[in-house]
Amino acid sequence: MKRGPERARGVASSVSLCDWCLGRQFVSSVLDAESWGSKVPREGAGGGSCALCREAYKKRKEIAAKAAAALDKFEFSSLQVGVAVPASQVDAEDELRAKFGLSSGIGIKKALVSLFRREILDVLGKEVLLGNADAALKIDLSDESFSVRSRNMSFMVRYVKLLKGVKTKGVACAGCGGDGCQACDDMGVSAEHPSVERSLVKAFKQAFEAAGVKISWSGSEDDDAMVLGRGRPVFVQVVSPMRRNGGFERLDRLIGGPVQLVQVESKDFDPGFFDGLRKVVRFDVELDREAGQDALAMIESSFREKGLPSASRRVKKVHWLRITENRGRKVKAVAEMDNGISPWRVVGLKEGEEGIAGLLGRGSVLKACYDILDFAWAHE
């Protein structure tokens, strides 16, 4: 024994330590600690519980087995292991090292992380990567409890809404205020009001067995507006999923009957992703009188690259509008516009709005409705 044998004997004689905790005060590898410590003669302070690890090393296989059981419900290919060590144990080691002037070795927290990581991987019996972890396991040695946090997953999703009368954003459950309870099936969104939001939350939460689901919207449409074509894009974040690839395979694209998933693509959320998004909208308008061809041509020309206020108060454009059908008092039109513009601004029912009603005369539009035919980016 060439590394401080006299100092090692002094440490071993002053306090009750297991071979592993004694050895790691002097070695640079956790794997060598027990063997090194076992060779140090003991005088005086032998036996009893280890003052530093409190028998964690002795119980390492038992603790690792329990930790592996806590991980059993989670699907992961990479793992991070953390260990919470009571402050009294850390302080006891600091005092011991200061007393004997120990400057090398491996600290208790780092050593325990390395120890349990190796033991847990051995119990799991499979190859697990250790970087950019899918799952993070924390072992609390104060009560031998285990908690697992799974890395969130993010998807760019397109949905279609094939039936009128379905809300886009749901109503928070009155019973829990959105936290999740039995009345809302732990979704946080009321089951009494069908919505795209509830359909998305339910589908992703159940498929991935997730703690929660968060949605970043690209806007919303009226309850009575259908969404067709390639569907509206949104970002769905799945919070702490138990399933990963398995969840993707279990995801039901027909998530809510009239609400269906057209596209689900794994993609990190980008706040600027929706910039440049456009929508094609179909209008059905009923007028108080028949509209002549000159009036309809005037409407079409008025909406060529026409700027209108958006939800963000920035001026955006209606790029074109075409009259597709004229049946006297009933007119159909299709328009392409920047996503931030409300289709109702094109109809222009409110005083001062520069829409169809403003062009034909206030009160000229008796009824109107719209559906969204498609979404696309300007560069597409």
Image (tube, rainbow, N blue to C red):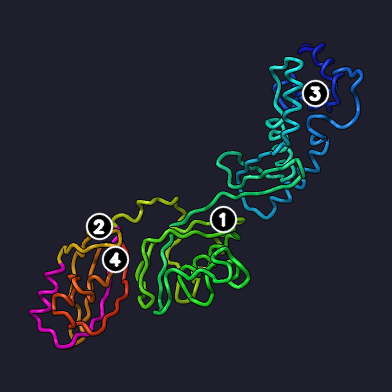
Numbered tag placed on residue 245 in the rendering: 1
Q: Residues within 10 Å of mark 4 (few under 14, many from 20)?
A: many
Magenta residues, start to end: 277-303
- Does the CB distance between marks 1 and 3 fall below 8 Å? no
Q: Residues within 10 Å of mark 3 (few under 14, many from 20)?
A: many
Label 4, on which residue?
279
**Dot placed on the residue nearer the N-terminal end, 1 or 3:** 3
Task: Establish if 3 lies above or below 30.
Answer: above
Task: Establish if 218 lies above or below 76.
Answer: below
Task: Establish if 76 lies above or below 157.
Answer: above
Label 3, on which residue?
22
Label 2, on which residue?
314
Is residue 228 rendered to the left or right of residue 19? left
Dividing the picture into quarters, in which one does residue 307 lie? bottom left
Residue 140 sits inside the magenta stretch: no
**Dot placed on the residue nearer the N-terminal end, 3 or 4:** 3
